[in-house]
Image (cartoon, helix red, strand yellow):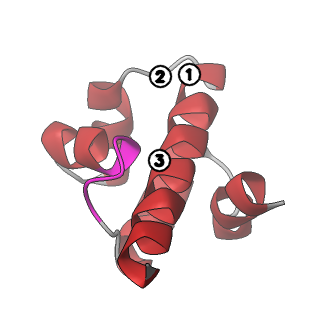
Amino acid sequence: MRERRDQAALRKFGKAMAEMRLAADLSQEELADRSGLHRTYIGSVERGERNPTVISLLRISKGLGCPPSALLQRPFS
């Protein structure tokens, strides 16, 4: 049960992150370049397959040009 909730939370986060990326008119590759992360990592986070670390969240938020809190507030508010 807990694992399902965790997976659902990761999918919600990934969907919100993808929406923010698209609103910023960025491709996964562009966001990856701006974040210093690999494109396939960005895609796997957006699909809810990866549980990003705090450092990755900080890098992604910098790439999106938003505060880290925006990445966490949007999918869970």
Query: In the picture shown, does residue 3 fall above or below 12?
Result: below
Q: Residue at x 68, y 52 (%)?
A: 66
Query: In the picture shown, does residue 58 fall above or below 71?
Result: below
Q: Determine the image quadrant of residue 53.
A: bottom left
Q: Residue at x 36, y 68 (%)?
A: 56
The dot on residue 14 is 3
Residue stretch in magenta = 45-50
Q: Which element type, helix, strand or loop, lies under badge 2?
A: loop
In the rendered structure, which disc, 3 or 1, sits on the residue that comes first in sequence?
Answer: 3
Instruction: Please give the residue where the numbered disc 2 appears in the rendered image.
Output: 26
Foreground of the two, 44 or 42: 44
Q: Hey, what amino acid is under mark 1?
A: Leu
Foreground of the two, 3 or 66: 3
The dot on residue 22 is 1
Q: Residue at x 56, y 50 (%)?
A: 12
**Which is in the foreground here, disc 3 or disc 1?**
3
